[in-house]
Amino acid sequence: MSIRVLAGLETLSFLERGTVSITDINILLSGMTELETGKSSITKLLSNKLHPQDNYEINVSFQPPAKKKPSKLSPVACIGKLNVLLEKNKIEFEPESDRVDPQGQDLLDLMAKVLKTCQEMALEISGHTDSQGREGMNQSLSQSRATAVLNEIQRRRVRTSKFITKGYGESQPIAENDTEEGRETNRRIEFRLLSNLKPSFSDISKEPENNE
């Protein structure tokens, strides 16, 4: 294979799309490169490889590479990031209310940013209370707080078509309720990944089932 042919073929490595035509009197290269220095690199290669008497023509245009969208976080990785945020802070509410307090609003800002980087997923936002007060009232409060968190996330323009809310009241403590520290721990919002779930809008507002 002649030097002219080898040089012509080597120039194709600078192109995303292109052709090279080699005749007895000329080398014609045409196409598109994503390298800003692509055309000058091709010119340098041909001038170094070819005999001074060889003619070549370069019709190459530059096109910046398309920006690749960052890959979305998997549901498992997304939940992991949310839990890291919840380990450092918690979504707090005004006393005996489902209104998220300013510190909780700041935390939801961060969580919304994470959720916007995640793949679509089925997610349960669950509300939990301590054991003080009537069981029915705790159940209702936990549900309204979970729903309030969903509303806040929606307000931050996060896609929530597969999110549901559920209030568990005082039924799932993770600490003893006989100390203030334990009760504070039990008053919480959790995010749980659900599989094979296709919730509808009605799922969001319906009364939670009794899992006891």
Image (spheres, helix red, strand yellow):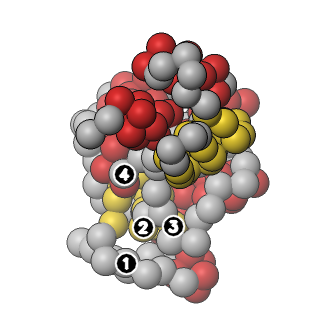
Q: Mark 2, mark 4: which one is toward the viewer?
A: 4
Is the residue 158 above or below the residue 36 in the image?
Answer: below
- Circles 2 and 3 in contact, beta carbons < 8 Å: yes
Residue type highlighted by circle 2:
Ala
Q: Would you say the residues marked 2 and 1 are in contact, meaning their CB atoms lie under 8 Å apart?
A: yes
Q: Left or right? Give the position of 172 relative to 97.
A: left
Query: Can residue 122 be seen by looking at this rendering?
Result: yes
Callout 4 touching callout 3 (CB < 8 Å): no
Q: Residue at x 48, y 19 (%)?
A: 51
Horizontal and vertical percent for residue 56? Answer: 61, 33
Q: CA distance from mark 2 to mark 1?
A: 6 Å
- Which residue is label 4 attached to? 74
| Residue in the image at 43% along x and 64% along y | 121
What crowding class fits label 2: few (fewer than 14 Cα within 10 Å), some (14-19), or many (20 or more)?
Answer: some
Give the foreground label among 4 and 3: 4
Query: Which circle's residue, 3 or 1, is located before the other in the chain?
Result: 3
Secondary structure beneath dot 1 equals: loop
- Look at label 4 and name its amino acid: Ser
Vertical order, 150 against 43 (above or below):
below
Classify residue 184 as left or right of residue 141: left
Q: Quadrant of the N terminus?
A: top left
Assess whether mark 4 and mark 1 are in contact (beta carbons under 8 angstroms). Answer: no
